[in-house]
Image (cartoon, rainbow, N blue to C red):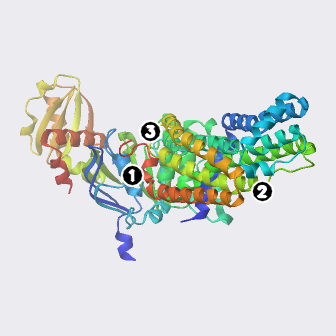
Amino acid sequence: MNTVAHTPAVALQGVHKSFNDTPALTDLEVVAPNGKITVLLGPNGAGKTTAIRCITGAMSADSGSVRTLGLDPERDGEEVRSQCGVVSARPALYDRLTGWDNLIYAAELHSVERRIMKDRIRVSAERFGIEQSLDVQVGGYSTGMKTRLALARSVLHEPQLLLFDEPTSGLDPESAQAVLKLIREMTADGHTIVMCTHHLVEAEGLADHVIMLDGGTDLVSGQPGDLTRTFWPEDSVDISIDDDPSILGDLSIIAGVRSAEPMNRGVRVILDDPSVTPDVVSAIVHAGARVTRVVPHEPTLEDLYFAVRRDAHDLGESMPKEMAR
Amino acid sequence: MSWHRTFTVARTDIRQLVLAKDFWMPMSILGSIFFVVVPLVLLFSIASLGDVDAVQNIADTLEVLPAKAQAQIKGDTPQGRTSYALAVFLFAPMAVVVPLTISTAVGAATLVGERERGTGEFLAHSPAATKEIYLGKLMASLVPGYLTTMVGFTLYSLIVNLIVGPEVGGWFFPTQQWWLLMLWVLPGFLLIGLSLVLRLSGRVKSTAAAQQASGLITLPLIAVSYAQASGAIYGTITTTIMIGAIAWFIGLVSTSRGMSGIRRQRLLGVADGV
């Protein structure tokens, strides 16, 4: 039992996949821990959708190892897919059918017991706020409603693993927020979620675990906090001033300050010791500058994303990947 | 293999076809033309014309039919014999044309249509095996064509019996050969056509391409079926049973190969070589 509990929900190792001669995945490593939200972050064409398809066995990898819930989707495809709930970038719904019929179809394909099927559908529809629209043909749904229906469909059979591929694509900001909130709520039920996105804002605050992809390979992976600490191990503080930063002189002579980088109307000070921040501010004021804002620099996923991509392009993609491993 | 899932796929596809008025309206019109309008006009004309030279001429041409077929023709007057021969022998091949046309139109769009609409992604990620999906789609393609034909056949039987029956001593249709053609020979030919069309549908890039290419398969098949259906009607019961058995054998082999040949990835928006 312990072995199962410690087995990651998804483990891809050295996965390669090409379409004709075009590589889609190259030596991809993905590990998604149980009960967490893992976000596959990357630009269009990074290989996120292909990775999802390999995870369920909808597509076969050319080489490498794919394990989903401890099983090989190639060999145990039916078992794997019956434990997965997928929402694709296009909601993949049958427009001519009603919402109810779409859900019935999914429930029957997933062999949900007939005696509990209708209750499950009602509960799922209520959870995602579409119970009033179930009798309407899906062709008449808004994009937001379609996404909600696709989400309801993905949880009907109570899967262990949820795979969401750009679930907010095409949604207005309000609907996107609502969908993200629903996704967040799902982890409270113990679901393992793997979500693809290229929206950094979505990943921020949602991801327990991030895997950055580019060109079909993983650049870095880990918990967002750990990753930012890897890239920015020192504390730093952003100080905004009303004057030209050149008047400040060399701030690194202050004890506890490692370096200072001028920014637009300010300076980023890298600190060995965060407690010297008041001394730095005092020195700046002393130099004749008017301080307007002092903010500790907390790197966001966006900072991390661009830093990783910059390093990957500057130093070759192996550098950050090796570093992450 | 789960038959429940196979039937679920078939039932859902049929349900979508029922809801697609733009699909079943033209198909109903096609069936009506072949099974109702043309026979009604032709048989009614002959019945109304009476014993004129034109009918006598048609009656004379019946001599080109095989001896066994000629021996089956009922009726004492040239008018009655002509009507009987037309009803029983001339219209037999249309029973093959209608279902093949309708079923291949459905079948051609079925797999590639899922991919085009993006719903193939849902099926590909579902636990349904590709064999179950293929077989479900095959059933869903077969049912509309066969159902239209059986409804058309029932109407045709009524028309024939009402118009020609009085001329030949009462209701006579369907004959034994027609029963065999409809219930044994025809499904076999449908199976051959659909198994090939579905394989094609899983390989091409678009529904339009699938429909173009399926024409290449169905036209020769219609020609062969036409000839064989005629043979089944003209020949003995044994010949009819044999023709049906061969069609079923080829159809089942082709279906089995189709089931094993389809790949899950073909349901997705991207596939090797597509």
Q: Is residue B223 visible?
A: yes
Q: Is residue A238 left or right of residue B101?
A: left
Residue A52: image tag: 1
The residue identified by callout 2 is B176
Q: Residue reaching furthest top?
A: A243
Q: Is residue B63 left or right of residue B23?
A: right
Quarter holding residue B249: bottom right
- x 38%, y 56%: residue: A55
Residue in the foreground of this view, choosing between A66 and B133: B133
Write down the chain letter for disc 3. B
- Residue neighbourhood size for the residue with mark 1, other residues' Cα within 10 Å, grouped as few (<14), some (14–19), many (≥20): many
Q: Residue reaching furthest bottom?
A: A1
CA distance for labels 2 and 3? 44 Å
- x 9%, y 40%: residue: A254
CA distance for labels 1 and 3? 23 Å
Q: Amino acid at mark 2?
A: Gln
Q: Amino acid at mark 3?
A: Lys
The residue identified by callout 3 is B205
